[in-house]
Image: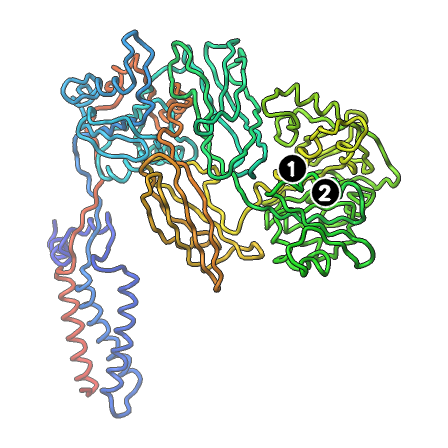
Amino acid sequence: MTFWDQLLEWLLKYPLTWFGQGELGLSNASWYVFALTCGGLGVLALLSARLNLRAWRPWRDLLGLTFLRTLALSLLLLCLFQPVLLRPADTQQRASVAVLLDDSLSMGISMGITDNDQTRADFIRTQFNPDDGPLAQALGRDFDLALFRFGLGTELVERADTLTFTQAGTDLAQALTYLEHALSGVALAGVVVVSDGGVRSGTALQASAQRLKAAGVPVYTLGLGQERFARDLEISAVQLPAKALRDSTVQAQIQIRQRGFGGREVPLTVLQGQKILSQRMLELSDSTLQTLSLPLHLEEAGPMLLHFELPLQADETVTANNQREVFIEVLDQREKILYVEGEPRFELKFLRRAVADTPNLQVVTLLRTGDSKFYRLGIDDPEQLQNGFPVTEEELFQYRGLIIGNVEASFFSAEQQRMLVDFLGRRGGGVLFLGGKHAFAEGGYADSPVAETLPVVLDTPRSGYQREVQLLPTALGRKHALSQLASVDDDAADNLAHWQQLPAVTIVNPLFQSKPGAAVLLQAEAPNLLGLAYQRYGRGISVALTAQNTWVWQMHADVAPDNQSHEIFWRQLLSWLVSETPQRIEVSPASGQVLAGAETTLPVQIVDAAYRPLSGASVELQLIGPSGQEQHLLLPEQARAAGSYSASILTPEAGLYELQIKATANGEELQRIAYVNASATGEEFYRAELQADVLRRLARDTGGTYFTAANAEGLARAIQPTPATAMTVQHYELWDMPLLLILLLLALSLDWAFRRWRGLR
């Protein structure tokens, strides 16, 4: 090293090459703050110099004095901010292996490999026992071993025998993200995941895998269990609407999975508490998966947990998946529907009569009797609809549903037509369009904005068209609650027979084609006319019923006096039309299902009277648990999401939680009661076979290897035992280096010399 190199190292305190390998930083602030502070010091130095120069002096004196004083103050400030050199350093250490052990409920399922009925949990305890566990000892010979339990959360554990296997979920993506932060700076030779693969996969898991691959950390997966059970019966899924009206019928779509029981006949039972809502004998198909549509009549109101169950079969691998609990909120509230009719007709009379005894449906009718003359039925007060169809969104959006009868499009102004579109798209209401000579294309709707909301394609108007047809449920319609005319205890064949016995109806609107995404529930066979179709539009639902005289289902001579098909059809149709219409306060999750023992983010959406997002509201939540314990929370509004509020709720025990929400804004107070059900087991016992594909993909994507219990002894040999290099960042202080002191003294000396030279004080 030359003299000049030694001198430079003394001035800088550290070798010059170190500065090329690292970067400069500040311990007490950022460079941005330092620059702003220096600017402020410069302004103060300028003012100070100007005050000291009482007599007129050239600008070069003022600027020179300001520059030198600012330089001196900035150097002093730099020392106070404690500059450091951030330099990466390589430290050789023994490589570590992180082992993620699945601590969820599904680990209690049998491994199914030997006759000793060892569970997946037993395998983990045996293999990873630090005292004599074969895998723990094999890995510990070459690596520092770190054990973690994961389920809904992740935690470092000392011993595998401390795992409880009681967590109701398996979030592997969260566990891998936890490791990234917890083991930052640790030399990782790899990560071992021991699980059955029944994890929450998706984009989050893929993102975690990509980050580990980029960091050069392979993931080795050890799959536990059987990829295919020999004998098992499972209710895989039950789909129900989130809400329904009291005394209505809903259709449950039930998915059943079986292994080894094809051809067997078993009873499917639906319970509400101790009350049997429905029981149906089911013949299990030879295929693995089958779907059953089951109508359920809901006579009682309130939050309900419906219990679906199949009897246990001999030699089943999993016994906890023969049942499911599904939450549904049955509303006992009066749903207001506005029915606009262009002329007196029997359809209006018998529709109103069909739902007259249904306390949860209020059909408010606006009947045109002449030019600007209306007859109003079912109104709440004399001022309601006194000027005809609503002209403001606030007035129209008070209704939960609309029925557009035999009335032409020109009856509505351009603004009212736009409001109809927004009633569907923004307000989320249900709109039912009825057939008639002034409806659909024949009523001029093809050229109106309303046409895009319809579930049917409007052809060229055909005045004078008329067909007598019998409407029957389509294959999709037979699975829908709307088509359930028979008793819920009758089977699908009995229900179809009810439809076949109904008289023909008249169609004057020839509609043959539904829009993409629309569902056709009723159809005539010859000609192939659409009878009833619906589609989602925005937040709402648009329904087209092309028949103009369904009243014949009650009044035709061939219909028995005690036949209730017409009444049942209209009660079902109107109840379904408004069952999912949103309120001004909406709560997620819409399914009403969370996990017991977990922390859940609860999003709440609030809208104003025009159903636009309501910002700036004060939102309070009172959460009442199954045992009566309460949580009081404030819900802040989410940034960049107007009208969206959220908070994290804790559901420590299983059962039904009541959510009492109060929102205050602009002097208006809104209230809503909602419910969530905290499940003790979640999805842990469903699809509980070894999901080998998930684990294989994770290992492949990160450069690791997939193992099973049969070849687990090769796991330790697959991980490279070479010492690893951990990259750490060293901080070297620079505030006391000689160069800074010399520069500070030089700046002060130059200031003194400049003032003497220019004759300044």
Q: Which mark is residue 369?
A: none
Residue 491 versus residue 745: which sits nearer the camera? 491
Is 169 left or right of 501, judged from the image as shown? left
Q: Residue 198, percent across and down?
A: 38, 25
Q: Residue 694, percent across and down?
A: 40, 24
Q: Amino acid at mark 2?
A: Phe
The picture quadrant where one finds residue 131 is top left
Q: Residue at x 24, y 83 (%)?
A: 49
Label 2 to label 1: alpha-carbon separation: 16 Å
Q: Residue at x 42, y 58 (%)?
A: 618
Q: Residue furthest front?
A: 561
Which of discs 2 and 1 lies nearer the camera? The answer is: 1
Eyeballing the image, is 410 above or below 601? below
Q: Which residue is mark 1?
A: 571
Q: Amino acid at mark 1?
A: Arg
Is disc 2 surrounded by few (<14), some (14 to 19) or many (20+) residues within 10 Å? many
